[in-house]
Image (cartoon, rainbow, N blue to C red):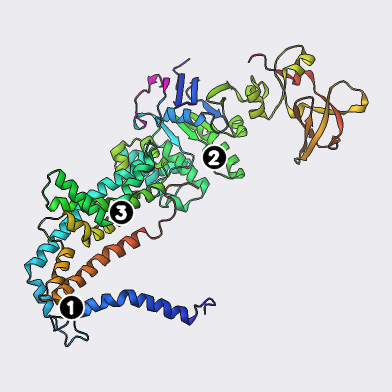
Amino acid sequence: MRSDRAPLGLKIAAGAGLAFMHLPIVLIFVYAFTTEDKSYQWPPPGLTLKWFGVTWNRPDVWEALSLSLRVAAISTAIALVLGTLCAAAVSRTKFFGREAISLMVILPIALPGIITGISLRSAFNLADIPFSFWTIVLGHATFCVVVVYNNAVARFRRTSGSLVEASMDLGADGFQTFRHVILPNIATALLAGGMLAFALSFDEVIVTTFTAGQQQTLPIWMLEELVRPRERPVTNVVAMMVALVTLLPILGAYYLTRGTDTVAGQGK
Amino acid sequence: MNTAAVRFKGVSRHYGSVRAVDEVDLSIAEGEFFAMLGPSGSGKTTCLRLIAGFDQPTAGEITIFGEDTRGVPPYKRHVNTVFQDYALFPHMNVLDNVAYGLMIAGMPKAERHKRAEGALELVALPGFGGRKPSELSGGQRQRVALARALINEPRVLLLDEPLGALDLKLREQMQQELKDLQRKLGITFIFVTHDQGEALSMADRVAVFNDGKIVQIGKPEDVYYRPEVPFVADFVGSSNVLPPHVVEKIAGKWTHASVRPEAVSLVDAGLGVDGLHATVHSTAFLGTATRVSLDLDGFSMVALLPKGTRIPETGEQVHVKWSPEDLHLMDTA
């Protein structure tokens, strides 16, 4: 029996707080099974699985899903390359303006999405770049880079710099050192950063509304469906699937970076 | 004389206005156990990094067995390094750590693992191959780092304060083992340390660094008994340095001189014996001897009195004496 048990009042308050945060999500799930499709009526008059079939046969859902997956995958890939390079430069070397660059890399995630969105939109306009798949990718990459950068820079700081020198000393050139020493030491950080970046990109709305042309990513599609009531529970089915799909990478990222607090490669 | 293993000709490394290494000339013979000794920031580690190729000199020339090293990257130099923090690869086990150099060189797995086992035996760690570096003690990691550096059969082994993280007993044991290993292998060891005892007991020759320059280079006995500049007397031997105006009165020469603390004896001021007048500042019992700090006219001295001698009280007036042959004049500087 533990002596430091929390008082009952605190337990109830904590439970109420958690319920407040998570019950609405459960509501969304429940409405995916309702038999009524015009207005959200509580309690649902009946339960059915037919909306899953309807969703399956809607080509617009598949298009939006495919676009979202492609955007997230490519933004994450760009972020992995740029974020790692930037983290390596900032944590490994000293140069004029290093702190400023570090701040400017992180800024996009601190800035409200609407500012990133508007500024990108006007920049694309000024440069006469037509809105396309690639403008969405660029918009998403701005904040995906930050997530990867943050993960990678933390790992680089915890990895002893003499590991790289030791590898070079033992005959490995830059590429071999990256492959045999650097990559294995930062791999879990990159995987975690990449998963978070993917999840962020997958449900991004604000920046996307400013940088997309006619395309609809999945979150944008859901927003449109809400104002145009037609087979409403289809939206709930999609929402449920999205919640489940994004939960997995975030959980994965959490488990991968857990328990890596010791400094890698330190002798003492 | 054969080609030097490592030779510095007017080597400097400046970081902006900081002269980390300043016009250093140096020649280390093949098979020599060479120590670079100095306080932190004196340029000794920078010199080691210049030899390894992690850093490039701003001026001067470094040759390794007669070959100019300008522009040669670390992975193309026949030198290997034992790092201060050991720098073992945390994601590999001990065997793969030791075999890393051979793996890079493209040796098949079975053979490089066999060689790595041999190297682990050399450093008295047989059978430790399957462990992770994090499962080893400090002394064991140090041996793994040594085995990993030796497996590439370097012609020069660089050791950057390798014993700094070990406790005293282990350090003394490793000093002996390193010395034995160097004799057995016959390769050149260049050893960086700030511990004068370590440098003196292990090295064939010692270079004493201060402010980016070598202030004295020679055999341990020379550096210890015959310091050429006051810095060496103080840093290497914790020796007493006498200022020129005192030396002129005693020896008739305007120069610094040094006297070892154990050569100093104290005489009661009332006995009328000739000697320097001093006041006892403090005393410290060290076990086999007692250290007495003395205030003299404008400078201070330390006497190490053996067991059995009378220890004066703090504040007592004494005369300081030593045999004439114990006074070392630094007129070569």
The residue indicated by pointer 3 is: A111
Residue name at image x 29 percent, y 51 percent: A108
Kindly identify which residue carries mark 2. B163
Q: On the rendered structure, is B4 left or right of A193?
A: right
Callouts 2 and 1 close, C-beta under 8 Å: no
Instruction: Tell me the kind of residue under disc 1.
Output: Ala
Residue at x-position 34% and y-position 42%: A101
Q: Which quadrant is home to the C terminus of chain B?
A: top right
Residue A191 - label: none
Q: Are dots 3 and 1 in contact, CB under 8 Å?
A: no
Label 1 packing within 10 angstroms: few (<14), some (14-19), many (20+): many
Give residue B331's position: percent from left, percent from top.
67, 14
Q: Where's residue B20, x and y in %?
A: 49, 27
Residue that label 1 marks: A32
Three-letter amino acid code at the position of disc 2: Leu
Query: Circle 3 marks a residue in which chain?
Result: A
Which label lies toward us, 3 or 1? 3
**Residue situated in front as seen by the camera: A77 or A19:** A19
* Alpha carbons under labels 2 and 1: distance apart: 67 Å
